[in-house]
Amino acid sequence: MHTADCLLQVQDLDVTLVTDGVARPIVSQANLTLRRGEIAALVGESGSGKTLLTRSLVGLLPVACRVSAGLLRFRGADLLSLDAEAMRAVRGAGIGFVFQEPLSSLNPTVRIGTQLTESLRVHHSLADSECRARALEMLGRVRIADPDDCMRRYPHELSGGMRQRVMIASALVTRPELLIADEPTTALDALVQKDVLELMREAAHALGAAMLVVTHDLSVVAEVAETLHVMERGRIVEQGPAAGILAQPSHPYTQKLLAATPSRWPRRQSMTQPSQPERLEIDAISVSYAAAARCSKSANTEPALRDVSFALEAGELLAVVGQSGCGKTTLGRAIAGLQPLHSGEIRLAGRNLRDIEPAQRRIQYIFQDPWSALDPRMRIGDIIAEGLLFRRDFAAARRRQAVLDALEKVGLPAELERRRPHELSGGQRQRVNIARAIVVEPRFIVADEPVSALDLTVQKQVLELLCDLRDKLGFGCLLVSHDLTVVERLSDRTAVMQRGRLVEIGPTPQVFRQPQHAYTQQLLGAASQGSVHGAH
């Protein structure tokens, strides 16, 4: 590569984690080069070291981690020799970073508009009016429907997908030369994922910028990447043109990742109904955030749910799909009793949910964001066991055994019981959330994007676990997902939502092969274009 074309050079990089005086290598002998305008992908399972490698480029390694060897050059400058002030000048203006977990990365006490314009004021010294104009323009480019309304909102008032788009806008608004995107489309539905990937690709080409996408989703690689770097246990084991590697991977680990893509999963057969069926009936429910919107002086008072009706049988897996902001998560929260209804009724085994004590409802919720769902002050074992505290038949010894069993079922080692959430990777934290849900043997589970933060091999493992437990215990599962390939392989029925309404529902094979509603056809079309097979 010609020196003038080289934007980023990572040479023989070692990153070490020091705990209790013992140094442990996390990244070993990593080599990676990006030229100006190049779009590259860094792929690997959770814990492979890909996030720590990229964080070392912007000086954001955790306190216990340090770069112990190697060379990092950006625009010819040695990044490791920069002091804190010089690194701040590079971070944001030269290198933009889209973080994996938007809720933990956005300040919950500051409005979106202030957070978007802050970096423009710091790095470019623009007037307030120009900062606001640029922020509005970027929100529009990442397909935020009402940028002006979004600017006035706080992070908790946005859906997971909208928060992720705000993070992307925040990174792009300073027009950096290198954009590092850590799982940039994790929380996005098929239509928005396609738009955002196209947007980032266009921005990189328009600005002459390079882009490094950190992901576990090979469909993202197929959609945007020119070159691919595969990491396993801290080492880059394969790299080269993305199309060539996806078509014919040479390393066994890359082959394993490709084999785990949902498009290669067999279709799971529907289970027979259990001997003692229970039914969850959703009868014409509506949810409105009008009061909250008035408090924030928002003009958006559109109901989040409008007269939604369907039934979820015991033992059934019903998937709910639709664009970000369509009401999927609101529906799940209403069923779990976490969101009050404006009208309508939810009945469990014929009884109104409001008349059943929360501890007796046996409905569990798996949250989308693994970080914000876990109390950072509690140990993992205590988090999982918390739901068993109301059970008088569970003494301390039995609770602990149930915790250990749940950890084993979700593929986590027993020693994690004593750790806290910040000591786990994103994928491990989500598995803890799933363990917390299954430990109480629920009758129904609402799973809100339960594997969006997990790598492909663990996605398959965890989703198969949920299905196996459903088959064994007979609980019904409402799966909220933007991954239509997963939905097609696993769900018995599929419900499609658009702007708070249920526009189509039916057996999954029927919905996917003969979609009746135009919106369903649009969703399926976008998903097929983004698949690994569709791109190559």
Image (cartoon, rainbow, N blue to C red):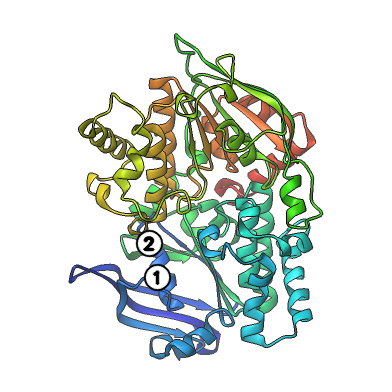
* Residue 178 locus on image (x, y percent): 56, 77
Q: Is residue 139 visible?
A: yes
Cα–Cα gap, marks 1 and 2 = 10 Å
At label 2, the amino acid type is: Met
* Residue 179 locus on image (x, y percent): 57, 72
Q: Residues within 10 Å of mark 1 (few under 14, many from 20)?
A: many
Give the number of the mark in front: 1 or 2: 1
Where residue 411 sits, quadrant-wise, is top left
Residue drawn at 30 percent across, 40 percent down = 407
Does residue 426 appear to the left or right of 517 in the view shown? left
Image vertical order of residue 328 relative to residue 60, above or below: above
* Residue 398 locus on image (x, y percent): 23, 30
* Residue on which the image places disc 2: 231
Residue drawn at 67 percent across, 28 percent down = 511
SS at circle 2: strand
Does residue 447 appear to the left or right of 302 in the view shown? left
Q: Residues within 10 Å of mark 2 (few under 14, many from 20)?
A: many
Asked whether 183 or 296 is in front, the reply is: 296
Where residue 528 sits, quadrant-wise, is top right
Q: Is residue 14 visible?
A: no
Contact, mark 1 vs mark 2 (Cβ under 8 Å): yes
Does residue 196 appear to the left or right of 55 in the view shown? right
SS at circle 1: helix
Residue drawn at 47 percent across, 18 percent down = 271
Asked whether 348 or 183 is in front, the reply is: 348
At label 1, the amino acid type is: Leu
* Residue on which the image places disc 1: 53
Image vertical order of residue 330 relative to residue 167, above or below: above
**Seen from this angle, which residue lies furthest top?**
275
